[in-house]
Each structure stands twice: as C-alpha cells, then as structure tokens.
Image: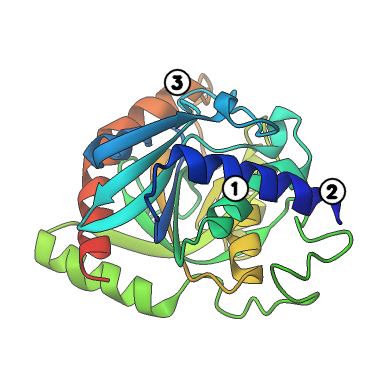
C-alpha cells in the first residue's frame, strides 16, 4: 500500500476514535488569527494535533493546532484551529494531510479561510473577500504518484470554488448586512512578505489578494470531488506605493484578522445553517 495512504488511514482511524461517534459532514480550515470561529462550535470536542500520531504540528503565529468538532449552524462540523504551511518546512504531502484526513472521516463540503494582503486597491483592512478563483505559485500537492483512492490523475479545476456556495454567501451577506468583496487569491510560498514589484506583478496578472496558504488544500479537496468555499480576511493593504518607513508585521496581520473574525463567523455559520 502507498505509505501516504497508510498514514492517512492510521490518523483517520485514531481521529474517529477520539470523535466519540460524531460524524462531521463539513470541514473548516481557519487561518491566521481566525481560530476564534471555533469558539462558536457547540458541545466541542477538542483534539490537539499532537495527539494524532504522524500528524504535523502547526507552528505559525495565530494557529493553535487543534481539531474542534461539534455543532455549528445546526450541522456537525470539524474545524482546523490552525493550518499547516509549506513555509514551516513541511513537505506538501504534510500540508494537505489534514484535508485528506477530514475527507477520510466523511466531510462532504470544505470551508477555507485565510488572512491575506489586498493587492486590489479597492480592498482595505477588515474587508471580507470571497475567493472566486486562484493563481497558484506553490508546488502542486498532486505531484507524484496519483492517489487513486482520492481522485483522478488530472482533476478539473475550472470551478475550484463552488458557484452555488458563492451565490449563497452573497445572498446571506445581504440579509445580515455584511459587506463582501469577490476576487482572485494568489498563493505564494512565503514566509517573506512580497516586494512592491511582486505586488504590482500580481495585480497585473489578475490577482486581488495574496497569501501563503489555502490553494494546496483546495486542490486536494477538488481532486476528491469536495465542493469548496473560500474567504479571505484582508489584513493589510499589499500595495506598491508605501511610505518610506512602512513595514509589514506578522502580529498586525493576526490582530486585523481577529478584528474581522466576528463577521466571518456569522457568515459561515449562516451558510452552514442554510446548506
């Protein structure tokens, strides 16, 4: 058996034991500073990543490193309170391992969130941007022997973010008086922030926001036929016309994400309730 499949199956079996009979139907990935959405999950079961043998541990600022399972919006969900990043030194197989494990326990829809820099001049700190498409500058997680148990060798990526979920988000946001933007997410390796010239380049090629995550998770979910909804919290204005003394700061990003987390929690909870 493929050793990657053995690892996934082993972690999946252990996670199922720790879930005490819960059967999550929805998976949620919470990015930098956005782990507070997990606080809205009712009757939570908290499972630290370190309690799952072979599971990578999140080391990034603002990522607590727990699975939280329970009820949200009337559905059984499992949320990652902190994701795994390529820049932490993990291979791409480890970066996407949590998604494959969630698929293994039976999720049917995936919600992904992140903190991102606004490339588009119309995006400002605190905005919520629904991801309609992406530009991938990270290694593709499907490189290598195909895992036939999960999906085909050449999966379609025409609609990486589910149109019906996007439509639902905008419909509910209008009712909840939540302002939403929509745009293209650019994913790079990090951990250094981009240069002003790179921000300009990303804007020219059609990017609206930039970050260091999310896309590998989306590719793996779509490989397995799982519909995805993606949203970015704009935590800094990634423009190329900075003041001479400007510096990007990781803690500022986390603080801005925390400030916007309430709106995102309300929106995702309502979406789940209406699925």
The answer to whether 151 appears left or right of 46 in the picture is right
Q: Image quarter for residue 260?
A: top left
> What is the number of the mark on residue 3?
2
Of the numbered discs 2 and 1, the one sitting upstream in the chain is 2
Of the numbered discs 2 and 3, the one sitting upstream in the chain is 2
The answer to whether 108 appears left or right of 190 in the picture is left
The answer to whether 228 appears left or right of 206 in the picture is left
Q: Image quarter for residue 225?
A: bottom right
Q: Are marks 2 and 1 in contact (CB under 8 Å)?
A: no
Q: Are marks 2 and 3 in contact (CB under 8 Å)?
A: no
Q: Residue at x 88, y 59 (%)?
A: 144
> What is the number of the mark on residue 241?
none
| Cα distance in 3D space between marks 3 and 1 | 33 Å
Instruction: Report which residue position mark 1 lands on.
Output: 12
Q: Residue at x 10, y 66 (%)?
A: 175
SS at circle 3: helix
SS at circle 1: helix
Q: Image quarter for residue 122?
A: bottom left
Q: Residue at x 57, y 40 (%)?
A: 14
The correct choice, above or below, for 144 with respect to 225 in the image is: above
Residue 22 at what x, y percent from top left? 37, 50
The correct choice, above or below, for 178 with respect to 70 in the image is: below
Instruction: Report which residue position mark 3 lands on.
Output: 251
Quadrant of image for the C terminus: bottom left
Q: Does residue 212 appear in this view?
A: no
Circle 2 crowding by C-alpha within 10 Å: few under 14, some 14–19, many from 20: few
Q: Residue at x 59, y 23 (%)?
A: 59
In this view, the residue in front, 231 or 14, is 14
Residue 157 at what x, y percent from top left? 64, 76
The answer to whether 17 appears left or right of 204 in the picture is left
């Amino acid at each position: 058996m493929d050793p990657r499949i053995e690892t996934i199956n082993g972690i999946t079996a252990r996670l199922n034991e720790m879930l005490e009979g819960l059967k999550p139907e929805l998976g949620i990935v919470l990015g930098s500073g956005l782990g507070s959405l997990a606080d809205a999950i009712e009757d939570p079961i908290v499972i630290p990543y370190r309690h799952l043998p072979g599971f990578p541990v999140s080391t990034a600022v603002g990522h607590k490193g727990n699975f939280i399972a329970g009820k949200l919006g009337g559905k059984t969900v499992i949320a990652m309170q902190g994701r795994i990043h390529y820049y932490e030194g993990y291979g791409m197989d480890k970066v996407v391992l949590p998604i494959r494990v969630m698929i293994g326990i039976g999720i049917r829809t995936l919600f992904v969130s992140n903190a991102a820099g606004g490339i588009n001049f119309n995006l400002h700190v605190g905005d919520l941007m629904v991801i309609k498409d992406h530009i991938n500058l990270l290694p593709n997680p499907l490189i290598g022997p195909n895992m036939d148990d999960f999906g085909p060798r050449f999966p379609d990526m025409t609609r990486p973010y589910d149109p019906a979920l996007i439509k639902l988000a905008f419909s509910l946001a209008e009712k909840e008086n939540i302002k939403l933007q929509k745009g293209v997410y650019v994913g790079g390796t990090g951990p250094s922030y981009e240069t002003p010239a790179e921000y300009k380049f990303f804007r020219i090629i059609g990017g609206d926001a930039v970050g260091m995550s999310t896309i590998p998770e989306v590719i793996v979910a779509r490989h397995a036929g799982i519909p995805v909804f993606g949203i970015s919290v704009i935590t800094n204005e990634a423009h190329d016309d900075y003041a001479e003394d400007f510096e990007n700061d990781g803690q500022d990003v986390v603080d801005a994400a925390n400030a916007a987390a309430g709106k995102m929690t309300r929106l995702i909870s309502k979406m789940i309730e209406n699925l």
